[in-house]
Image (cartoon, rainbow, N blue to C red):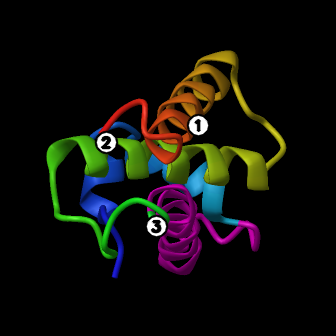
Amino acid sequence: MSYAAKADIQKRLDDQKLIQLTDFANAGVMDDAKITEALALATAEIDSYAGGRYTLPLTASDQVKDKCVALAIYKLYQGRQMVTEQVRRDYEDVIDFLEKVSAGKLS
């Protein structure tokens, strides 16, 4: 189970960008498995921070979905070693938030 879906990522990245980030075979098609893997990694990262304070899986919310999408996008960019400054800032913001959740400073 993931806190977000491919369609949620597609609201932020167009298909051409997703092809660029996932098509390691240079076939000109989006690799859904890479997107699924990025979402799974993002969900696991959220769970690793929240699991000490909350029952997992977390209740679905727009905030959790948004954090999951940001982490998954970072993972996709990282896989191509082309993380942009904005993607890095978004990732750092999510990690900062999750660290505060883990420490009990935010919920």
Give the residue pinned by disc 1. 95
Residue type at numbered disc 1: Ile
Mark 2 residue type: Asp
* Marks 3 and 2, how far apart at CA: 18 Å
Magenta stretch: dominant secondary structure: helix
| Res. 82 image quadrant | top right
Q: Are marks 1 and 3 in contact (CB under 8 Å)?
A: no
* Residue hosting label 3: 51
Q: Return the residue found at the far right.
A: 81
Spatial CA distance of label 1 from label 3 is 15 Å
Q: Nearer the viewer, residue 54 or 19?
A: 54
Residue pictured at 75% horizontal, 74% vertical: 25
Position of residue 13 measured from the top left corner of the image (x, y, whole percent): 41, 40
Where is residue 60? Give x, y as percent: 16, 61
Q: Is residue 59 visible?
A: yes
Taking the magenta stretch, the answer to whether it contains residue 37 is: yes
**Residue 54 versus residue 9 in the image, above or below:** below
Q: Residue at x 34, y 64 (%)?
A: 54
- Circle 2 residue: 66
**Callout 1: SS:** helix
How crowded pointer 3 is (Cα within 10 Å; few <14, some 14-19, many 20+) is rated as some
Give the spatial CA distance, label 2 vs label 1.
Answer: 13 Å
Label 2 crowding class (10 Å Cα cut-off): few <14, some 14-19, many 20+? some
Q: Please tell me in which quadrant of the rendered image residue 101 appears.
A: top left
Instruction: Give the mark toward the camera: 3 or 2.
Output: 3
Front: mark 1 or 3: 3
Residue shown at the point (54%, 80%) measured from the top left: 33
Residue 92 is left or right of residue 51, and the answer is right
User: In the image, which residues are magenta?
Assistant: 24-50
